[in-house]
Each structure stands twice: as C-alpha cells, then as structure tokens.
C-alpha cells in the first residue's frame, strides 16, 4: 500500500542543512564538559579578543564555550524529548484511531483498578516521583479487593478515542508556553525534568496525526479482511497498521525537534526549566538584558538557532517529498511545514 | 445644519491639536513614578519584611523618632522633641516622650499616648505575627501614661543604652480607633499581656479581628497618621500612594525635614527586570530608578542623549552584599568550614565586575567609612582556594577518590560537602557572585547547586532555614548598633536567618546595645567584629554604593539609607526664568 519514491539527488540546501546539523551534533559532542568559569576581568567583551574570540557575556562567560555547551544542551533536551513525544503520540494516537470507542473492552475490575490508581496519582500530584512506590500498592490492593468482593466481572467498552481526543483538546486549549511555564514553576530545574515536561505537553500533534493516519489505514479493505480472518489486535497493529503509518513520524520527527528547540530556548531565556549552570542558547540570548549594547549576545546564538531550526525544516520537507503524498495526512504535514 | 458643520470642524481641529501637543516640561507634575523591583512582601505593619514594605510603612505611618542620615541620628517625628531619659536602678531606663499636639488621625481625632500604648500591646499580642517586633522592641517592658497629659507617656526599657532610647521610638504608631474602637485592650497592661499564656478571651478576640483585616493585602484598612494613604495596589503592576488632602503637618508654619511631603501622588511601578526598567526610564515611563546596576548606570551617564534627559546621583550606602551560611546545617556547623568557603569569593574581582569598582570591601558588618567602629586591623577577605583546602582539612573534611569532600556527621555517617546556593533571581550582581563562587568551589571539589529564587519565596525559605548558603544584601544604618534581630538567639526563626548564636555573641550584642560610653562601644564593636570574623555566620563581600537616575526635571534628595532617596521630598525643579 505504501508507496515510497527513490530518494532524489540532494540539493545544495539539503546538503547545507545536513552539514549544519552534523556540525551541531559535533559541537554537542566536543563541548567542554565542566561548567564554564566566569572570567571577571573580561566581562561583556566584544568579539575579537585573543582569549574570547566570540566575546563574553556580562558575567564573564565565554560566548564560544557557551555556544558549544548550548548545542549539547539542545541535543540532550530536544532529541530525547522528541522521541518520547513521538512515542507517546504514537501509542495514544494509534490506539485511539484503531480501537475507537468500542474496540477495547475490559472488566469492571480492571477499569476500577485503573481509575483508582489514576486518582491516587492525581492526589499525590507534584509528590508523585518520591511517592510513586505507593502506586503499584494501590493498584494491587484495588485489584485484590475487587477480586475478593467478586465485583466487576462484566466487561465494558472503554471509549478510548473519546478519552484521547478529550485529553488532546484539554491540553491544546491552554497555550503551550503557558502550560509548560506553569509546570516548570513547580519542579526543580533539571535536564531530565525538562525532557519529561516537554514530552508530556507536546505529544498532542503527533497523536492527532497518527490517529488520522490509523483511521485512514483501518478503513482499507485488506484490513477488514484481516479482521474477518480473526488476526489478533496486537498483530494487526504491529504488522499491518504501523508499517503504513510510520512515515508520518519520520516527517514529524525533525519538526518536533525544531518545536522543542524553540520551546527550550524560550524557557532558558525566561530562566526556567534548566539550572543556571547548564549553558543554553536561550540563556545566552537572555544575557543581553543586562548588556543591551552587547550585539554579539544576540548575533551568535541567533544565527545558531535560526540555522538549526531552518535545517530541521528543510530535512522535514525532504522527508515529506520522499514519501509520495497520496495520503491526505501527508499533505497536512506539508501544510504544517509551510506554516 | 450648515452652521453646525463649521463649528464641529473647529471643535474637531481643536481637540486634535490639543491631543497632539506635547506637555510643557516646566509644568509642575505632582505625580512621580518610581521603579520598584518587587512588590512589598507584606503590608501588615507588624510584618515589614522587605525594602518596598518598609518604604510604604514610612510614608503611611509615623513613628516617634526617625533616623536621618544627614544628622547621623534620630530626630523627633511624631514626638515633639527628643525624649528625656531617667535611669531606674542598674538595669531599667525610663524614656519619656511628648507627642506633637498637631498630630491627628484621618478621622480628626488626636494621636494620643494611649495609641502608643495600644501599639505596644499589638506588638506583644499573642496570636499575631510579632516575632520580629519581639526581637527588635522586646526591651520595652511597660508604658506609663501621664494622667495629667494625654500626649505624654514613659516607656520602661530594659537596658540603658542610648541605642535603646533611639530604638524605643522606631516603630509605627497604629490607630486604636480603627483596630479596637471599644478600647477593650485598655484594661490589660503591657506586662500582663507579655506574660499571658495562653491569651485571655479579650486578647484572642482582638487577635482574630486583627487577622480578619488581612492587612498584608489590604493596607487601606488601617490608615496611619503619615502623609500618604495607599490608593491602589495591583500586585506585580503598581502601587499608588496619594497624599492626604489635609495632613496634620500641613498646619505647621515651617514643617521640619521629616514632616515634609511634596508629591501629590507616588506611583511605584513594579518592573522586576533591570533592562526593562532602564528602557522605561529612557522612554520617560518612570521618573526615578534607584539601585541601578552599575554597568547600565555608567552607560547612561556616558550617553549624550541620556545626559540631556536624566540626572545621576551616587552615594555611599549602609547596605552590604554578603554570603550567609545556615549554621544549623550539618555541613556548615563549624566555623572552619564556613571560613574555608569564604576564601572562595574573589571580592576585588566581583567589585570590579559587578560594581564597576564602585563598592567598598569590608572585614565585617560595619562600613569602613565608620572609622571609629570599623576594625581595620582585621584582614580583608583573600581569594585563596589553597587556604580553603587547608581549612577544610582542619575542619575534618577528607577528599575522597572521586574528588569530593566527606567527613562523619554527628551520627557517625559519612556526609559529603555539597551545597545549595540561593539568591534572588534576575539580579546580575548576585548571579555573578554565585557563579564565581560555584566555579571556585568546583575547582577544589565542592559541588554547589545554584538556586536562583523569586524574592518572596527566598525570604520564606531563609526564615524557615531551608537554604544552605545565600547571597543577599543586608541594610544597616549609622545610628544604631543593635544586632539583636540579625544575630541574637532571640531573632532565630524571624530575622536571624543564619541561625547563628553563641552565648558570647548574645552577650556582646546585649553589651553593645546597652553601653553609652563611646570608648567602650568601640571596644565591644571591634570585639564583636573579631568574633564574627572567626565564626563567619556570614561573609561580607562589599558595601554598596547607591546609584539613582532620575528625570532631569526632578529634584531628588538622595540618601545612603535604602531605598537611596527620600520619596516624600522629591520635587519638581523650579524652572529658571
């Protein structure tokens, strides 16, 4: 069903984009690991100095070193967060699109256990991480108790599609930046925390795309035939749905990275999300507030940021072009890229 | 209709021209806009915990005396004259005040001695947030009202120091008619109130009513006898003070310095970000920006455009930047560790980088400008990681194979020397100091986690003892050397945020506050500086120099006391003919 074209010859801009992204990854790899030490004798130095050839910020931090470390922060945050985002979006979107509102039936016992565990997680709220050992206990306790009481053997259909769509609408009703800022305000700044935070807030777009692609594939006659032949749901998903929808993710991956880079930079600019010792391009941009005439604090990180995001968009465009846009979903992705 | 049209056209033109014309720069503007970095934490007069709140309290309430930097002493404010004193046996001091006859509350009733008595009772009322008042004014044990003169009273103080005389008049007087209109507290004496545990029903009822007013957010519910009232407050945006149309001091033929209030309206714009504040000043959206970052101040001073629009003031202050250690934390319990960590601050470089060299290093909490009391024999802080390592070894720390430092704690378990360093977010000078310290500490194997924190959260954390180290400023004054709130055991849990106290330091603080002999005071203060130098509950990095930039049309009286200007005495310059 899926039609893939042979890769076209690379254009110059694609080569430049790929080269730039390789440079960023190289910078991330070779960046000094120790946090930068401020050079208080050379604060807000313009570029061209012998010791700091790209200049320093108002705290005496070397801009070149900060750019390299910023690249590493960017890679360490955006790539894992994108993978997690796509994983979450794929699972929820595919499940919602394939199982719809009646395809998943569970016993009352399982459903009650799930709801009670979710309720416990909600009550624990921000203390979830240290207290998460309680959750398996709550789940097991509920399961055993409901089993002893011989309750909930009847099976009931879970409206998964409606639930996922509702959750997506709920998350999308709040502006993404506000949502991320609110969540970042209650947790201590850390790289891992930021990755989880971005993943939990940005999965809705991939989920929508995966749901749409799954719906489209599910309606194909060969899948009806496979269902009629009694092939189990899991196998249907893995063997027949996933191979025909994964191209959506390939196109979405660079775009998600670009989105998360923008978010990470915004958060760093605002001084939330990452610890102050962790250099980032957003932090470097923010330093201009304390030295408004230091143009180099805008220029270098600005060039890095624009080039990286532009390169990722070119790569996404390239991916989209490699896949024959017969499916409506791909034209939707193309629209996203153009936007 | 034909006649109406030209008339309408003329009216439209007039309105258009009027709205497009610029205002005359010589016109007296009765309203001034001042930049604040943050809102007041709390406007309850019992809990004045930050500079903004203190400024508002000084403009809306009056105390008996007020410190004036120019006179390096307190002067009468609500009091008619400086109080008379009388020693009673070896330890008690009677301080007698006479209130100004002109002083009245907003309802026209006079400010009387019973209002002072009421205020002292509020400051000692169980169930109210009185910890800070207890630390600062706990030495006032009783008040005796004069039966023949409703404006005359005597405070009974423990200790006979001149500082006690001055401090005895340094609290805002509250109106009894608002808080206790039926005078239910009048029958309870101050000593009885201080000893009443648990509080009686009258006191408990009063505390409930006081708390119900929620003065922390609604200062307008408790009007003081100062020249201004809070007429608007939107947190995070602005706070507006409006001058009372008929303030009692207006009736004085020649009001003294402390009773002058010129601006009709003072609007404090909350602009946390320094760059945004500078932009607002340059655009004329604010009139005054105090405590400006040094680099920005220098840049504006050197700009020809800004020189035409703005004027610049600098003055030495009594405020210092210090690194505080929470001595209750296990890793910071000993003086050697604290001294080792102090060696990791590069003070001269920090002064140059953050203050453009315009700050003064000091050995302790007394400014080097106060030559009489400053302990100039002590060495200034020396940046020496080598000395820090040596001191850490002396303190029992051993460097592990991983490079970190460990030693057994009180329970015998190994503990690692890891620290969190908290400071106010968005303040470049603090952040630079924190980063410099962090880099130096990392160099000798100490892990430091930087924690930029919002101001009100940081204040709460400091009071609760939730920080290891902090970088913050401390404000002082040249009139009083009472360190009780800052370093006495009585202040722990309130204003003594380091948790430091020793019997010897408590005794010295009490002796310093009690003595009126200058030679003895000098001796005690030097001894106290030596003790702090050895114990290091905090390390003074440098004394700040205040920088104020203001619109050129203003005449701004600057002062070395926070916030660096006297808001009530700001005026528009008289235009030259």
Image: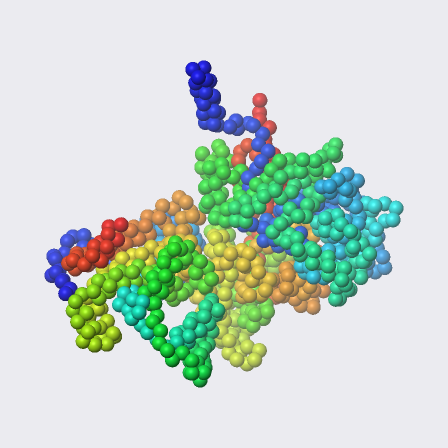
Q: Residue at x 84, y 51 (%)?
A: B145
Expressed as whole percent of the image width and height from the top left, the position of residue B332 reads: 56, 69
The answer to which of B299 and B372 lies nearer the viewer is: B299
- Position of A226 compared to B105: left or right? left
Compared to residue A201, the image places residue B356 above or below, namely above
Is residue A131 in view?
yes
Expressed as whole percent of the image width and height from the top left, the position of residue A66 reads: 36, 57
- Position of A89 compared to B185: left or right? left
Compared to residue B182, the image places residue B91 above or below, namely below
Q: Residue at x 35, y 48 (%)?
A: A298
Image label count? 0
In the orientation shown, which residue stands out farthest toward the bottom? Answer: A148
Expressed as whole percent of the image width and height from the top left, the position of residue B333 reads: 58, 71
State the image quarter where residue B70 is shown.
top right
Q: Residue at x 45, y 27 (%)?
A: B20
State the image quarter where residue A246 is shown.
bottom left
In the orientation shown, which residue stands out farthest toward the right? Answer: B148
Is residue B525 in view?
no
Expressed as whole percent of the image width and height from the top left, the position of residue B302 reads: 46, 38
Q: Which quadrant is home to the N terminus of chain A?
A: bottom left
- Position of B442 compared to B153: left or right? left
The answer to which of B566 and B454 lies nearer the viewer is: B454
Q: Residue at x 67, y 65 (%)?
A: B489
**What colour scheme was applied to this rendering of the protein?**
rainbow
């Amino acid at each position: 069903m899926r039609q893939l074209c042979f890769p076209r010859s690379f254009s110059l801009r694609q080569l430049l984009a790929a080269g730039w992204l390789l440079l960023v990854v190289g910078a991330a790899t070779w960046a000094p690991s120790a946090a930068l030490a401020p050079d208080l004798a050379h604060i807000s130095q313009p570029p061209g100095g012998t010791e700091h050839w790209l200049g320093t910020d108002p705290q005496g931090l070397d801009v070149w070193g900060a750019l390299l470390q910023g690249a590493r922060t960017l890679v360490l945050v955006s790539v894992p967060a994108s993978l997690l985002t796509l994983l979450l979006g794929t699972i929820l979107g595919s499940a919602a699109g394939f199982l719809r509102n009646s395809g998943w039936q569970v016993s009352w016992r399982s459903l009650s256990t799930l709801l009670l565990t979710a309720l416990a997680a909600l009550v624990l709220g921000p203390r979830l991480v240290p207290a998460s050992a309680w959750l398996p206990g709550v789940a097991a306790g509920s399961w055993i108790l409901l089993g002893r009481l011989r309750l909930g053997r009847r099976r009931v259909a879970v409206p998964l599609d409606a639930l996922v769509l509702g959750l997506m609408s709920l998350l999308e009703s709040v502006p993404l930046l506000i949502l991320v800022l609110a969540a970042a305000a209650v947790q201590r700044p850390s790289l891992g925390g930021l990755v989880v935070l971005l993943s939990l807030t940005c999965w809705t777009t991939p989920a929508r795309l995966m749901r749409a692609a799954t719906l489209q594939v599910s309606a194909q006659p060969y899948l009806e035939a496979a269902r009629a032949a009694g092939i189990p749901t899991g196998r249907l998903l893995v063997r027949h749905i996933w191979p025909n929808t994964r191209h959506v993710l390939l196109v979405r991956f660079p775009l998600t990275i670009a989105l998360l880079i923008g978010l990470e930079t915004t958060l760093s600019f605002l001084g939330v999300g990452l610890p102050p010792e962790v250099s980032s391009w957003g932090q470097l941009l923010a330093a201009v507030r304390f030295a408004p005439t230091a143009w180099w604090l805008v220029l270098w990180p600005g060039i890095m940021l624009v080039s990286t995001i532009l390169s990722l968009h070119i790569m996404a465009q390239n991916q989209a072009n490699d896949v024959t846009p017969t499916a409506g979903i791909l034209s939707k992705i193309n629209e996203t890229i153009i936007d | 209709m034909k006649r109406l049209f030209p008339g309408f056209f003329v009216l439209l033109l007039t309105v258009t021209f009027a709205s497009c014309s610029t205002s005359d720069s010589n016109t007296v503007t009765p309203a001034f806009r001042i930049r604040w970095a943050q809102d007041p934490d709390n406007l309850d007069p019992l809990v004045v915990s930050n500079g903004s709140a203190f400024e508002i309290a000084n403009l809306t309430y009056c105390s008996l005396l007020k410190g004036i930097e120019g006179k390096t002493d307190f002067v009468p404010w609500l009091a008619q004259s400086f109080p008379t004193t009388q020693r009673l046996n070896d330890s008690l001091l009677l301080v007698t005040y006479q209130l100004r006859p002109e002083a009245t509350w907003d309802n026209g009733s006079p400010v009387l001695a019973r209002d002072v008595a009421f205020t002292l009772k509020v400051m000692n009322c169980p169930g109210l947030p009185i910890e800070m008042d207890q630390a600062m004014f706990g030495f006032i044990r009783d008040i005796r009202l004069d039966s023949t003169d409703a404006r005359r009273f005597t405070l009974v103080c423990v200790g006979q120091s001149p500082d006690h005389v001055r401090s005895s008049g340094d609290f805002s007087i509250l109106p009894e008619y608002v808080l206790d209109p039926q005078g239910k507290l009048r029958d309870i004496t101050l000593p009885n109130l201080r000893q009443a545990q648990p509080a009686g029903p009258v006191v408990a009822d009063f505390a409930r009513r006081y708390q119900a007013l929620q003065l922390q957010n609604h200062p307008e519910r408790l009007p003081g006898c100062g020249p201004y009232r809070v007429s608007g407050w939107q947190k995070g945006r602005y706070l507006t003070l409006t001058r009372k149309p008929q303030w009692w001091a207006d009736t004085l033929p020649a009001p003294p310095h402390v009773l002058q209030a010129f601006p009709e309206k003072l609007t404090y714009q909350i602009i946390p970000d320094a760059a945004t504040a500078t932009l607002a000043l340059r655009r004329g959206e604010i009139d005054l920006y105090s405590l400006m970052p040094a680099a920005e101040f220098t840049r504006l001073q050197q700009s020809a455009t800004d020189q035409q629009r703005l004027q610049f003031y600098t003055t030495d202050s009594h405020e210092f930047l210090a690194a505080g250690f929470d001595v209750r934390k296990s890793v910071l319990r000993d003086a050697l560790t604290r001294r080792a960590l102090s060696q990791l601050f590069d003070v001269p470089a920090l002064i140059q980088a953050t203050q453009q060299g315009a700050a003064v290093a000091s050995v302790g909490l007394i400014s080097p400008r106060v030559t009489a009391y400053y302990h100039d024999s002590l060495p200034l802080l020396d940046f020496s990681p080598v000395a820090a390592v040596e001191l850490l070894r002396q303190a029992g720390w051993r460097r592990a194979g991983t490079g970190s430092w460990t030693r057994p704690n009180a329970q015998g378990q190994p503990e690692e020397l890891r620290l969190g360093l908290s400071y106010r977010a968005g303040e470049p000078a603090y952040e630079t100091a924190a980063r410099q310290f962090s880099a130096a500490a990392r160099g000798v194997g100490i892990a430091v986690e930087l924690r930029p924190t919002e101001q009100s959260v940081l204040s709460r954390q400091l009071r609760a003892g939730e920080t290891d180290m902090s970088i913050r400023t401390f404000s002082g004054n040249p009139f009083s050397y009472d360190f009780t709130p800052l370093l006495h055991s009585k202040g722990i849990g309130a204003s003594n945020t380091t948790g430091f106290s020793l019997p010897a330091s408590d005794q010295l603080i009490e002796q310093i506050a009690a003595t009126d002999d200058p030679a003895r005071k000098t001796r005690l203060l030097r001894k106290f500086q030596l003790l702090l130098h050895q114990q290091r509950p905090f390390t003074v990095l440098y004394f700040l120099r205040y920088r104020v930039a203001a619109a050129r049309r203003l005449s701004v009286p600057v002062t070395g006391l926070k916030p660096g200007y006297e808001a009530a005495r700001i005026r528009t310059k008289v235009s030259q003919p």
